[in-house]
Image (tube, coloured by chain):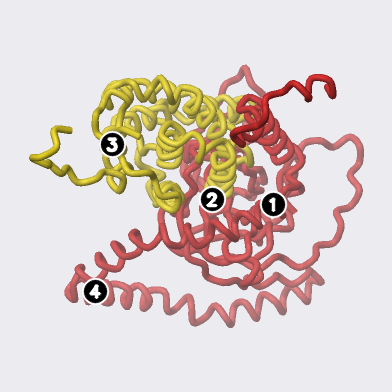
Amino acid sequence: MQPTFTSSRILLPVRPWFIVASLFLALLGNLLPTAWWPGIPDWVALVLCFWSIREPRRVGMGWAFIFGLAMDVADGAVLGQHGFAYVLLAYLAASQARRILWFPVAEQALQILPLLLAAQMMQLLMRLVAGGDFPGWGYLIGPFIAALLWLPGTFLLLLPQYQPVERDANRPL
Amino acid sequence: MAGIDDHAPPPFFKRGPAPLALLTFYLAVSLALFVVDLRMKSLDLLRQTVALVVDPVQRAAQTPGSLVDHARVYLRGLQQMREDNTRLQQAQLQMAPNLQRLDHLAAENERLRRLLAVKEREKARGQVAQIMYTARDPFSRRIVIDKGQQAGIVAGQPAIDEVGVVGQVTRVFPFSAEITLITDKDQAVPVQIVRNGQRSVVFGLGDGHLELRYIPANADVQVGDLLVTSGLDGIFLPGFPVAKVSEVKRDSAFAFARITAVPLAGVENFAEVMILDPRQEQPPPPPEPPSRHNDTGATKKHGHKK
């Protein structure tokens, strides 16, 4: 597989433990005491979105549901709030995966933004319907920051799959 | 179906159920969980099971923050420590006359109450817990503390800090517990105005402020009035400071005045809290005469939480 479909660089196959480790690291990021800063992205949503696009056969709605449940419990949110949003995000990302990977990375970020925004809006909508208060527009900054982080994120998460560039003078390929 | 099966292509690749079917399934489960949790609040077992798995991650996520804290304390230096020490010693000295007589006064109070045949005041006991972190959910005001079922915490216990009431334990996990702050939306605390003894209920507004409801527009409430727990709910012991009235708006169009208060306790800071033990069993309230409906609503929310 390649970083994007138009790239000529070939990647090594992904290691399953790395996917799980990165998801747990994202969960750790979400649990850091950053609740009072505005615009902190939802790390789990970002990493989940990334793997749903890169490896839709390995990471899917099941993982999304499990991590959503974990987030609900850790956050003290109503059960199912994150789960619903993450499952929807994973589905949308996986269904768009083949299309999104044709774009260069910067344009991929633009394609990711509506997905992340939809997941965030979904949570907002569920809570408003259930009688919550509007938490302020700062709540919706997160996805924009997350979309910006798509570029370094892609590089970091693909890093273990890159192989060294070897130039062989005898082989033209 | 059986007829078509013969002509179906052999399954070369194992693919599992169709994505749309999976999506529908998971969304339905999520929605069911959401509704059940919100309306019936009966998913504690599931929550505790998941919490057992998430707990180590939560504790790990805390480490950088506490490292920074330790570093700050370490770097603050000897000088400031000395100043702190002097200041605290002076404060203790200032309070000494009152403190030394407190035991005596408490004993006297008890004796007098016994003479008057009034029930003796309960003593406040509790255990100190560290605040682990503030929940990320922007829709609710909650904090998580590092003591849970293992330390004997039960839902409903009040939490205070050195200045006043912080909140109430609402969920208990094996190794941690969740405290709903008094500023959480519609969290209710029955209070009493110290100056004139008028009773009411403060409700959280969800934005860090409290609102004193069910006070008639012509009632004697002033900016700066201290609100303490009234103890009528059978959960909070009476006399703990809760909030200070910050704004009183009287509008003749409404029967009730609009009174805003700010919490006294450092409700949204990182620190330690004291979890008070549950109160002793209260006698059942006398049956209310049907015509009195002035003072209701005081214990509505706590009733659910028990």
Q: Earlier in the sequence, mark 4 or mark 1?
A: 1
User: Label 3 marks which chain's residue?
Assistant: A
* Residue B106 showing in the rendered view: yes
| Mark 3, residue position | A10
User: Label 2 marks which chain's residue?
Assistant: A
Q: Residue at x 35, y 34 (%)?
A: A1
Q: Distance of mark 4 from mark 1, alpha carbons?
A: 46 Å
Q: Distance of mark 3 from mark 2, alpha carbons?
A: 39 Å
* Residue B211 showing in the rendered view: no
| Mark 2, residue position | A74
Q: Please, what is the three-letter code of the amino acid marked with disc 3?
A: Ile
User: Label 4 marks which chain's residue?
Assistant: B
- Please identify the quadrant where the C terminus of chain B is shown: bottom right
Q: Nearer the viewer, mark 3 or mark 4?
A: 3
What label sits on residue B81 in the rendered view? Answer: 4
Q: Earlier in the sequence, mark 3 or mark 2?
A: 3
Q: Quadrant of residue A102?
A: top left
The secondary element bearing badge 1 is classed as: helix
What label sits on residue B46 in the rendered view? Answer: 1
In the rendered image, the vertical position of residue A59 relative to residue A116, given as above or below: below
Q: Please, what is the three-letter code of the amino acid marked with disc 1?
A: Leu
Callout 4–callout 1 Cβ contact below 8 Å: no
